[in-house]
Image (cartoon, rainbow, N blue to C red):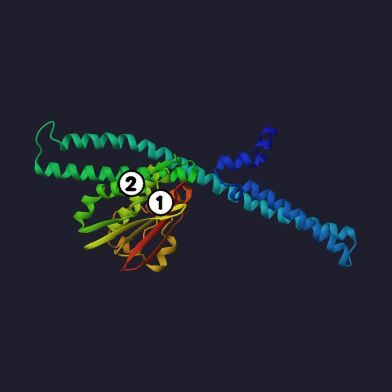
Amino acid sequence: MSLKFLLEELNIFGKCRQYRLPLWHCPQFLFLIMGIVIILTALITYALGTRYFILDQGAVSLIVMVITIILFIITFSIVRGMEGLAEANKLKSEFINIVSHQLRSPLSNLKWASEVLISEKFGALKSKQKEYLKIFDENSDRMNELISDLLIVSRIDQGTLPLNKTKFSLGDLTRGLIDELKILAESSNIEIRLEQPESLPDAFGDAKMIKIAVENLLDNAIRYIKEKGDVCIKLENRGKNLLFKIEDNGVGIPPDDQKHIFQKFFRSENVLKYQTQGSGLGLHITKSIIEKSGGKIWFKSQEGQGTTFWFTFPVK
């Protein structure tokens, strides 16, 4: 074993940065803490053994040494396993990031080509040809959305999600999204209402990221209403924070699924039976964005009655 390799292994903070893990989740740091605990336990055991048990110091020392070696071996094995998992998680995130970037360019080219053909710039299309091209175009959009979600999740896992914080109007941002999703809502026979006070302070955060979070909540609310329904959004001033509330009368979330909804790739069973589109990443991304921006998110839901989400967001 070279000196350079040994020094790299002993560089706890460098290893933690390499795995992109906080200190208390880093295998090398945990091994150091466990080592200190084992040594202290050995010293205490030795002191108690020589004072309270009828054994000579040599026997006590031998017992303590054997116990210490066994504990160190167990700890080393556990930490090595954790290190392997951390390395696998790092490689997984890097793989997702690379593949997502590589897929984006050809998909963008295919999207552009389909749009040009649909526009009939190079000649008229038969109705069936146009129908198939529209299906292709819609699926290209879905793939691009999935790739964008995967890239954001990869950056969240790596701790590299950029947050360019500035002042912005949460009310204007929400109204803009309502306008963008108006066609989807009207086609689903859903009315969206926005309620906010006349005077609402600006929020402080990354408007682009918050737009993604709000869009995920609003898109879910629309898609998970199976008949005519309503989506109500309320914005409130709570002193140092703004409160965002979105309420729908959709399918709701079963009680057994509620503890899992912020997990990656999780989709509730009652949603799957309706074959609603989705990757199961939206709420995970939303929660990560809100929390990294200094806010909190929570919800309540009743199956068959609807769901309400809230999140708070700092004003400065």
Which tag, 2 or 1, sits closer to the chain's start?
Answer: 2
The residue drawn where x is 25% and y is 48% is 179
Residue type marked 1: Thr
Identity of the residue furthest to the top in this view: 122
Q: How many numbered markers are drawn?
A: 2
167 lies left or right of 51:
left
The residue drawn where x is 30% and y is 59% is 232
Where residue 299 sits in the image (x, y, percent)?
40, 61
Q: What element carries label 2?
A: helix
Where residue 243 sits in the image (x, y, percent)?
40, 55
Where residue 313 sits in the image (x, y, percent)?
44, 51
Q: Do the residues labelled 2 and 1 touch (CB within 8 Å)?
A: no
Circle 2 or circle 1, nearest the eye: 2
229 lies left or right of 105:
left
The residue drawn where x is 34% and y is 46% is 146
Where residue 177 sits in the image (x, y, percent)?
29, 48
Which residue is under mark 2? 173
The residue drawn where x is 43% and y is 54% is 312
Q: Which of 110 and 159 is in front in this view?
A: 159
Q: Residue 286 carries which label?
A: 1
> Is any part of residue 55 visible from this angle?
yes
Residue type marked 2: Leu
Q: Which of 47 and 202 is in front in this view?
A: 202
Q: Dividing the image into 4 quarters, which one contains the N terminus?
A: top right
> Is any part of residue 151 visible from this angle?
no
Q: Is mark 1 on a helix, strand or loop?
A: helix
Q: Distance between the residues labelled 2 and 1?
A: 15 Å
- Crowding at dot 2, Cα within 10 Å, few <14 / some 14-19 / many 20+, comes out as some
